[in-house]
Every structure is written in structure tokens, then in C-alpha cells.
Amino acid sequence: MINLNAELFEALVGKHLSATRQAGSEIWLVDSVSRRKGHSARADQPFDVYFSAPAGKAALQGMVQATLPDGDAIEFFVVPVGATAEAVTYEAVFN
């Protein structure tokens, strides 16, 4: 099982992954990672990841099944936090 930590996503900043949701599959860009203050409920540091997805499909929150560039599969929950005519920005919060 892949450990979903800040280091994993920091290595993916600027890279694309294949994201599958109820609305279908898309290619998403990993935009940035923001580390937050640690707490006792998580062994490593909490963090947020921001993704850009193509505009056009409904921007809904929910689970995403993603395939990393190396072919590994991961799952996480996203919430849309912004949109332009070109892209929807999603946030994944890892507490």
C-alpha cells in the first residue's frame, strides 16, 4: 500500500496523473502541496494538495481514483475550490 504523504505529492508537482471519478476519467495536473502544523492524530505532517482538472465536467466533491505516472493506483477525496474557463482547481486535505 502506498503511503499518501507530502513527500509523495511534492515529487509529483508539475506532473500529470490520470484521475477517475463518477463523471469519468481526466488528466489532472498536480499544482502544489501545502504542509500544515502537525498534531497528535497523524504520525506525519498534515498537508493539502492542489490539482488542476480540465473545465467542462461538473466540478463535484468526492472520491478520486488516480493512477500515478509510475502506474501505481491511489485514492483520495477532493473538493473543488476554484474554477476558470480553462480549469477547475481541486483540494485534497490529508489530516
Image (tube, rainbow, N blue to C red):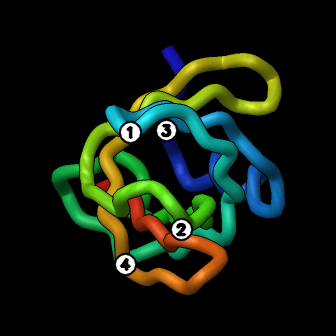
Query: What residue does disc 4 label?
Result: 81
Q: Residue at x 50, y 72 (%)?
A: 89
Q: Is residue 47 left or right of residue 73?
A: left
Q: Is residue 82 left or right of residue 40?
A: right
Query: What residue does disc 1 label?
Result: 23
Mark 2 or mark 3, which has the lower sequence index? Answer: 3
Q: Secondary structure at mark 3?
A: loop
Q: What is the spatial separation of the Cα atoms under label 3 and label 1, in whole angstroms?
A: 24 Å
Residue 39 placement: quadrant: bottom left
Do the residues bearing badges 1 and 2 touch, measured as CB atoms within 8 Å?
Answer: no
User: Looking at numbered disc 3 in the image, what kind of residue is underneath it?
Assistant: Leu
Instruction: Residue 93: tell me if it is visible.
Output: no
Q: Residue at x 51, y 71 (%)?
A: 88
The spot of residue 55 in percent (x, y) is: 56, 66
Q: What is the spatial separation of the Cα atoms under label 4 and label 1, in whole angstroms?
A: 17 Å
Question: Where, quadrant-wise, is the C terminus in this rendering?
Answer: bottom left
Query: What residue does disc 3 label?
Result: 4
Front: mark 2 or 4: 4
User: Looking at numbered disc 4 in the image, what kind of residue is underneath it?
Assistant: Val
